[in-house]
Image (tube, grey):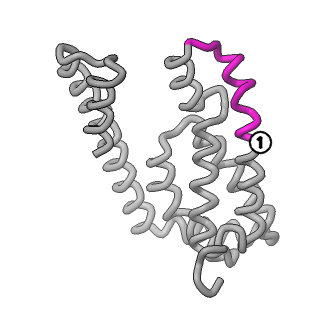
Amino acid sequence: MSCVYALIIGLLIERRLTLKALPEVFLRAARTSAIVTAIIAVSAGFGVLIAQEQIATGFANWLSGQVSEKWITLAGLNIAFFLLAAVMDEIAIMVILGPMLIAIATKFAVDPIQFGAIIVTNVAIGMAAPPIGYCLFVGMAISGLSLGKISRMIWPQILVMLVVLFLTTYIPGFALMFQPGK
């Protein structure tokens, strides 16, 4: 529905799209969809391999033997997710690393819903953060602004997202406030 809505807006209201340009637009959309689908397929296969070989459980056991403090583990995971999200597709991160690292979350008694919120928040921050952030390139393309100007404009939002990440990570009730009985 959103694609149909975007077509109507682009063709009839904003008039940035023409009927002549639609085949090229559809072809670019098909290419992008194929790339995302391939990433998801490979990620899912990798996730199955990790599960079958019990890599996640072994890594969780090793990590819990090395690090005894829950907050240190969560801080390390936050940094790793942030760095990965700046250079890696968010779907691949969630499909590959989410199931793999849930064993670590379980080992340190982190609620799975809270852990999912931590992953999603980290990925959102990584996608927005300069220099790789997806939002920067979209914003540059739309507005014609320079990378430096967009970087300065987006930092206040990233700081707010970092506060939300801190609350989600270290105050379980923040992430679980809408869960019945939590």
**At numbered mark 1, what does the secondary structure look like: helix, strand or loop?**
helix
Q: Give the residue at x 54% y 23%.
A: 137
Q: Give the residue at x 61% y 74%.
A: 178
Describe residue 99's horizontal placement relative to residue 130 as left or right: left
Residue type indicated by callout 1: Leu
Residue 126 screen position, x and y as percent: 62, 41
Residue 80 screen position, x and y as percent: 66, 48
Residue 28 vertical position relative to residue 96 in the rendered view, above or below? above
Residue 21 screen position, x and y as percent: 22, 16
Is 73 part of what is drawn in magenta? no
Q: Give the residue at x 57% y 71%.
A: 113
Residue 141 vertical position relative to residue 162 in the rendered view, above or below? above
Of the 4 image quadrants, the one containing the C terminus is bottom right
Residue 39 screen position, x and y as percent: 36, 43
User: Which one is in front, 106 or 132?
Assistant: 132
User: Which one is in front, 90 or 149?
Assistant: 149
Q: Residue furthest bottom?
A: 181
Q: Which residues are magenta?
A: 144-158
Is 153 part of what is drawn in magenta? yes
